[in-house]
Every structure is written in structure tokens, then in C-alpha cells.
Amino acid sequence: MRAFVFPGQGTQYVGMGVELARAFPEARELLALADRVLGEPLSQVMAEGPAERLMETEVTQPAVLVYSLALLRVLQARGLQADVAAGYSLGEYAALVAAGALDEAEAIRLVRDRALAMVEAYPKSNRSMVVVLGPEREKLDELILRCPAGEVLAAAGYCAPGLHSVSGTPAALDWLTRQLQEAGGPSAQVKSVPVTLPFHSPLLAPAQQTLRRRLEQVRLRPPRCPVVANVTAAAETDPQRIVELLVAQVVRPVRWVETMGTMRLLGVGELWEIGPGRSLSTYLRKLDRTMKRVSIEDPSSLEAALAEVAEVAPSRAPVALEAGAPEPAPAPPAE
């Protein structure tokens, strides 16, 4: 079985979509669709920047989604479909498109409105999220429960063993950093994430009401394949439940380690990461070296995957994957 997975915020870069649009008309059409839907030249900001503008949440989120959908459209135009789908945070919206539950245009509008709701929900701060490397999940959760009174800490994502993201107030993140360094010494590392909002934390709860209203206006169809949800790490197929989980996702952590466990239980043999960067493929290397990995992030990787599939099409054998030295652990997608 083949799973399509999609990355979240934090994987964007200036120049997104330029080569892809030159190589594939389907990608050009998707980028043009996004510009029409949003009523502004998102594709130009993706291509030319400036980087500061592309880093703004209300631009970043639709940009990452649109690039992922452009790659997906090329694959689907050539007959490739997912047996299971999942996405890291905002990537879950791309997963719903891949599963046929959500239209491309509606997904783009939803993600833009979701991002705007988050921006309005909480004041921006350059100290909103950190990546924590070293401690196991249980140790991290224990520390979060001990957060000083009046401050907020929340696990934002469990990405791989010993690799997590945490959101919170600046003082709480400073406290967590001191606690981890004192307890873990040099092996415990805490790195700031260059975002301005505490994603997947109760601090963004005000955005949930706005997102719920928008989702109630959307016709979400039953997906044609299971979509593994961030909040439950379970395969979901009921549209009403999916809506509830998308709302809950705003304040709940991304359970990516468990998501990959569900993929194994479902019989997934190959994981296709579709979108900018290779963070999700790298997490899989830390989680399960037996599952095949395909990273599709640009025209060359897309063409290589298509060529490989064409060669093994009769038996639908797993696609040949990345080789070489292990990659360093990347920062988790911020959102």
C-alpha cells in the first residue's frame, strides 16, 4: 500500500513553484487557481519573496499547501493515487484533497482563513515555539505539567523518538529550556523555531470558533481512502468527525510517531512525502527503516518517482528510495 503524506509550515522557501510550473502545466494551472481563489498573487510571493513576507503565517500556510497540491495534481494526472493519506498539521488539508474529501479551491480558502484566525487569536512573539531534542516523550510531558503558574506550555508535536516541538509563552519556554539543560546536560538541546505564534497550544483556542464556522460552510465528502488524523493518530473516514478533529487540531499536538504506527498497521509499505522539504521522510528514517520512502519536492524528484513507477507498474512494487548517509534530524514543521 502507498501513503501520501504532506508537510506543514516551516518548510517554505523563496522560489517555490518556479521550476515546477515550468516543467508541468498541471502545476501552472494549480498556482493560477490559487491566485484567483485568494484574489492576490500568492504564486509571485512564493517565487520572488521577499522572505519576510513568505514567513508570515497568513502567507506561509497557503503557500506550503499550494505547492503540495501542485505536486499532487501532477501525480494524480498520471494516475497515481494514495491508499492512505496524512499530513503534518496544515498538511492534513492536502491529505483530504488527496483522498477526494475536499476540493483544491476550498482547501486553499480554508487554510488561508485558518491562518488569519490564528493570527487574530494571539499576539505575535518571536519566542513562541522550540524544538526539543533528547528527552523521551514521557519526560517532556512531565516537565510540561510542572509549568510555572500563570504561564502556558504545550507539546505541539511528537515527531520522532527524542524529537518534539513545544509551544508556549516566552517565560514558560525559557523555564523549560533551563529545566532540560540542567537535567540532561549537553545531550538535551532546545532550539528556537522562527515563528511568531504558539501553534498547537491552548493559546490559539480563540481561532477554533472561527475555523468551526468556516468548516460548517464546506461540503466535506467521505474520503475515498483513510485519512490518519493528527489528533487521534487513527484512520478517519467520517466527514463530521473529520471536521471536529480539524477544529481540535488547532490546540492539540501532532501525534506523528503514532501516525506512522497506524500506517504500519494499515499495511502501508511505501510513504510518499509530497511538498517542500524532506522532514517527514527523515522522521520515518528514525521511526521505521523498513518502510520505503519517496520524497517528492521538485521536478527532478517527481520525474524520478514517475519513472520508477512506470518501470514497476505491472506489479506495483515499492519505489526505489533515497540512499546514502543518514540525514541530520530536521526541525519539525512549526505548524
Image: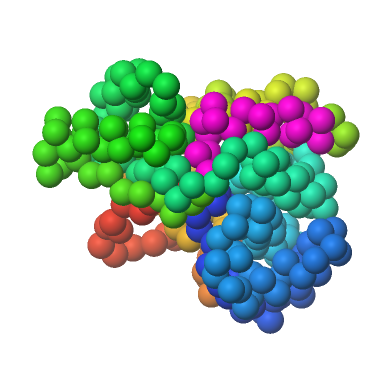
- Residue at image point 60% right, 64% down: 54
Quarter of the image that includes the N terminus: top right
- Residue at image point 72% right, 66% down: 42
Where does the image place residue 90, in percent across and percent down from the top left?
62, 44
Q: Is residue 326 left or right of residue 157?
A: left
Which residue appears farthest toward the left when viewing the image? 185
Q: Is residue 237 among what the camera can see?
A: no
Tell me where residue 243 sits by quadrant.
top right
Closest to the observer: 232 or 57? 57
Closest to the observer: 78 or 170? 170
Where does the image place residue 137, in percent across and percent down from the top left?
32, 27
Q: Is residue 51 among what the camera can see?
A: yes
- Residue at image point 21% right, 31% down: 179
| Colour mapping used in the image | rainbow
Q: Is residue 43 left or right of residue 156?
A: right
Range covered by the magenta-colored residues: 197-214
Vertical arrangement, residue 206 with respect to residue 320, above or below: above
Instruction: Assess whether residue 201 is covered by the magenta stretch.
Output: yes
- Residue at image point 70% right, 74% down: 44
Q: Is residue 169 left or right of residue 211?
A: left
Tell me where residue 215 sits by quadrant.
top right
Vertical arrangement, residue 47 with respect to residue 109, above or below: below
Q: Main secondary structure of the magenta part?
A: helix
Vertical arrangement, residue 283 with respect to residue 78, above or below: above
Closest to the observer: 83 or 139? 139
Vertical arrangement, residue 27 with respect to residue 177, above or below: below
Closest to the observer: 230 or 224? 230
Where does the image place residue 307, in percent across and percent down from the top left?
57, 70
Instruction: Assess whether residue 293 is covered by the magenta stretch.
Output: no
Where does the image place residue 116, in percent across and percent down from the top left?
70, 46
